[in-house]
Image (tube, rainbow, N blue to C red):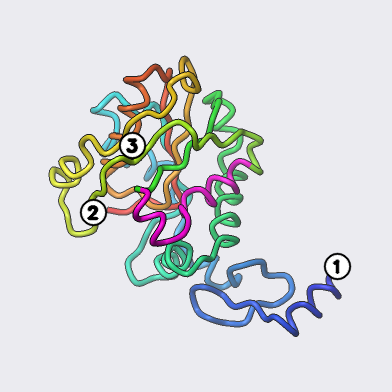
Amino acid sequence: MKLFKEIFDFFLPRFCPSCGKKLIVDEEVICSKCLSNIQRASESRLHYEFQKKFSHKDIISGFASLYIFEKDKELQSIIHSIKYNQRFLTGKFLGELVGKEFNKLFHIWKIDYIIPIPLHHLKKAERGYNQSFYIAKGISKQAKILINSKVINRNRFTQTQTALNLQEREKNMCGAFSIKNSNYILGKNILLVDDVITTGATISECGKVLKDNGAKNIFAVSLAIAD
């Protein structure tokens, strides 16, 4: 297998989506240096973020994230490559890391379905794919929990959230989602998956629609959390 990878890399070299360095055989989709430089989210940080973003709304029952999003650092480049450069394997690879880290927690939560946060159909057509779906695929592979993308629609094209404050983000997301088929979620525990959670407005609005249509508990997980 190693010889096969060496031959493959000779003809089709692979490069790190962060630093651009050629990957060696033992490196999968991100070089070991860049991967080790990404700041992990501590348990205390996750507790703080849950209290700050979700606890007061009584929509999200539990939350986990693997990394801290830092501007102009390795993870920003990597997530940009997943979203805009069709690095599907990178999304799946990082999803697998999330799945390995939180597999036990997901089963404590008794998750029935994984649902990636949907894109509006115009944005999906423009980009060609939903990056959260590939992250969810990696999580699903490790946690052995089914993905269900037939439940919820993003029925309104929302402006980018980047420059908006919390109140503006919540207003921007209000009414953005609708249920396609509530039969899938009645009495079920749902795990929502996104790439980066900043204020939690998108996750909360999506979770609210799911709970209003019969889901039992909503949990959330992301690659990273941002201030």
Q: Is residue 175 above or below residue 122?
A: above
Report how far apart the C-alphas of labels 1 and 3 lie in the structure: 43 Å
Name the kind of residue labelled 2 in the image: Gln
Front in this rendered view, residue 10 or 33: 10
**Are the residues at dot 2 and dot 3 in contact (C-beta closer than 8 Å)?**
no
Q: Mark 3 sits on what residue? A: 50
Q: Amino acid at mark 1?
A: Met
Q: Which mark is residue 161?
A: 2
Horizontally, is 66 left or right of 31 in the view?
Answer: left
Q: Residues within 10 Å of mark 2 (few under 14, many from 20)?
A: some
* Quarter of the image where one finds residue 180: top left
How dense is the environment of label 1, judged by Cα within 10 Å: few (below 14), some, or many (20 and up)? few
Q: Which residues are magenta?
A: 121-140
Question: What residue is shown with label 1?
Answer: 1
Residue 203, how many percent across, how many down?
A: 34, 38
- 74 horizontally vs 155: left or right: right
Residue 43: image quadrant is top left
User: Helix or strand or loop: what does disc 2 sit on?
Assistant: loop
Residue drawn at x 49%, y 74% is 18
| Mark sitting earlier along the chain (2/1) | 1
Distance between the Cα atoms at labels 2 and 1?
A: 44 Å
**Residue 48 magenta:** no
Residue drawn at (37%, 37%), measured in percent from left and top?
153
- Image point 29% across, 24% down: which residue? 58
Q: Amino acid at mark 3?
A: Phe
Dot 2 or dot 3: first in sequence order is 3
